Every structure is written in C-alpha cells, then in structure tokens.
Image: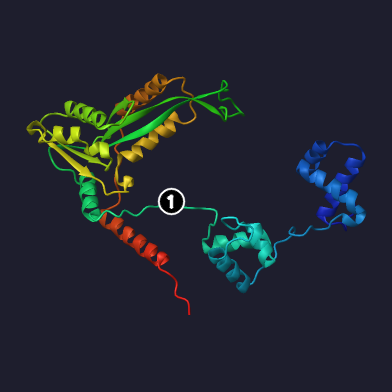
Amino acid sequence: MASSSASTVRAARQARVLLLAADGVANEAIARREQVAPNTVRAWRAGFEAGGLAWVDTVAPGRGPEREAGPEAEAAIVADTLTVEPPDGASRWSTRQMAARHGVSKDVVARTWRETGLRPWRTDVFKISSDPDFEAKLDDVIGLYVDPPERAAVFSFDDKTQIQALDRTQPSLPLKAGRARTLTHDCKRNGTIDLFAALNVATGQVLTQTRRRHTGDNVLAFLKETDRRTPRHLDIHVVLDNLSAHKSDPVRKWLAEPRQRRWHLHFTPTSSSWANLVEGWFSIPARKALKGRAFTSVAHLVEVIETWAANWNDDPRPLRWTKTAEQINAKIQRARTALNRATQPATHH
C-alpha cells in the first residue's frame, strides 16, 4: 500500500506512517518525515490498532470532502441560527452543532453563515441615548469640533478613573528573536490613579493631571490649571460629559464669578461618551504606554503617564472629527427604529 501506484495519497501516507511506527520510530520523528501533526500519527496508530488493515483509508464521520447542501438546507440553517436556541443551553450555535442538526458538514454551515453575513459568535455593544435634547447637544458639540469659534480655545475634557498600577508576581523576560516578551498571568495591585485630560481640538496638545480622586474639588483644580495655561485673550469652550463632579457646587460657583466669563461648558448628550473627542485620545496611551507593562507603585505609573504625555505634546497630532451631525442623527434614528421594531410584541393568530 505504501508503494503501490493504485493507493490513494491518504492510504499511502498512512501506510508509510504505520511502517515507520513498526520500525520503532518515534511519533514526532514520523510526523516530521511525513509532514503531518504528531497527534495525527497517534490517531492513525490507534485507528490501525482498533480496525486493522480494513481501517486504512477510511473516512471518519464528519470528515472528508465537504458535502453540498441545497437551497432548502441553507435556508433552514439561516432560520435556525436566527430563531432557535441550541438544545444544550448554549447562548449561540457552533458550526458543529448546526451541522449535526441538519446532517451537513461544519464547513457547509460556516460557508452559509459567511455568505449570509451571520456571525453568531459576535456581540456588539450599544446604547441609544434617551436625552430629550440629543440632537441639539450633538449639533453644538460637533459644531465646536468642525467649526470652532474665532479667538477661542476648544478643549475636550474628561477624566479616566481607576487606572491600576499593576505589578507582576515574577520577573518578566525581555523581547528577543523568536520569543515575545513575557508577563505572568497574575498580578499584584499597587493602587490606582485618576488621569484628567483636556485635549486642545485645534492643536492636539493635551493638558494632563493625575489625582487620587475625581471629586468636584479635583475637577475645579484642573479647570483652574487649564485657565492659567490658556492665554487670557482667548475664550475657553470645554466639551465634557454629564458626570456629577463636572456639575458640582464648587465648579458652578467658580464659573459664576465675573472673572470666568470666558468659560463656556458644552455637555455631550447622556450615554454618548463617544461624542467626547478626548475618549479617543485616552486609548492611545493605554495601548502605547500602559499595556504590557509592570508598575511597582503608583508613583511609577504617574511617571510613565507624565513622560508619555510630555513626549506627545512635543509633536502633537490633532484628532479630526469626520462625521457630520446629520450623518450621526440619521444613524441614531435607524437604530431607534430597529430597536422599537425588535421590542414590539409579536402578534399570534
């Protein structure tokens, strides 16, 4: 069988593997020689032991060439994916479960899902704002991004809370050729810090402060620092969310003073943090400076954040808002329509 020209490629390879095994060659060596996985060698040996020569070149159930499915089977697969829950209590279907249900291969199910755009393994997160002034607030905020007023500085402000100073329980290995840097899967928590940031929409520069808490007094201290670092001849427009600390008594009293007439706060719609441009900036240091790092203390974490922010401001890159308010409002309206349709009770006859 190993040398016969009448044998299939599969039968000839299995025969060669079994002959090498009979000669006492190790599984890993056989796998390298025949260019198969070591587990495949083990499975073939077990199959031969159980079934003898009759087993060679047989195809196990569910294996082998893909079985075609007709339009009716594909339509049933799509319908079941959308409307039927798996019988074992799982939250979503797998290709193998669906294949067993309809008597086809898992590849048929995968192809059907791919062609119809179904991805049962994915869940997208959403939240539609219920703010009654959504459109007006969105127009106001995006207007500041795309057409800022003259003689004014526009800042996008927020605070990223509870940034953890995570150390590792064992020393890490550095990056080297053929091996990624390593971190232990468990960690030691050395405390947290809050990062306050105000992104200058025009220049891309960011004013930052780190603080232990984010109370109204902490917010006020940061606003005062922003005021000191902004030229006096410019008005200050700040985009911010609806956190209670941003509307606290200390903040409101300070803004009510005649000296703060140049300050103008623009609140994003509720449940719309995506409308705050600085949220996109927060993701940059999280990826580039904090991810995959070990911090021995909060002071070490603060040092890394401040160093990274200083280097960013040496060569800032403005974040450009690209969607118009009309485009966003149209998308929100489509989402509301879809949500209302999905939550309407079905009518049974």
Q: Few, some or many C-alpha atoms within 10 Å of disc 1 (few <14, some 14-19, many ≥20)? A: few
Q: Secondary structure at mark 1?
A: loop
> Eyeballing the image, is 81 above or below 36?
below
Q: Is residue 103 visible?
A: yes
Q: Nearer the viewer, residue 8 or 260?
A: 260
Q: Residue furthest left?
A: 258
- Residue in the picture at 19% in, 41% down: 265
165 lies left or right of 97: left
Q: Which residue is mark 1?
A: 125
Residue type of the residue flagged with mark 1: Val
User: Which x, y percent locates residue 301?
Assistant: 41, 23
Residue 43 as seen in the image, left or right of residue 265? right
Q: What residue is drawn where x is 58% and y is 62%?
A: 85
**Is 267 placed left or right of 317 in the picture?**
left
Nearest the eye: 63 or 259: 259
Q: Residue at x 45, y 52 (%)?
A: 124
Q: How many marks?
A: 1
Image quadrant where residue 159 sits: top left
User: Depth check: 145 or 297 in front?
Assistant: 297
Q: Nearer the viewer, residue 111 or 229?
A: 229
Image position, residue 128 (x, y; %): 34, 55
Q: x%, y% of residue 79?
A: 56, 68
Q: Is residue 336 left or right of residue 326?
A: right
Q: Is residue 2 visible?
A: no
Residue 276 position in % (x across, y down): 29, 43
Residue 346 vertical placement versus 290 (above, below): below
Tell me how the rendering is colored. Answer: rainbow
Outermost residue toward the front?
249
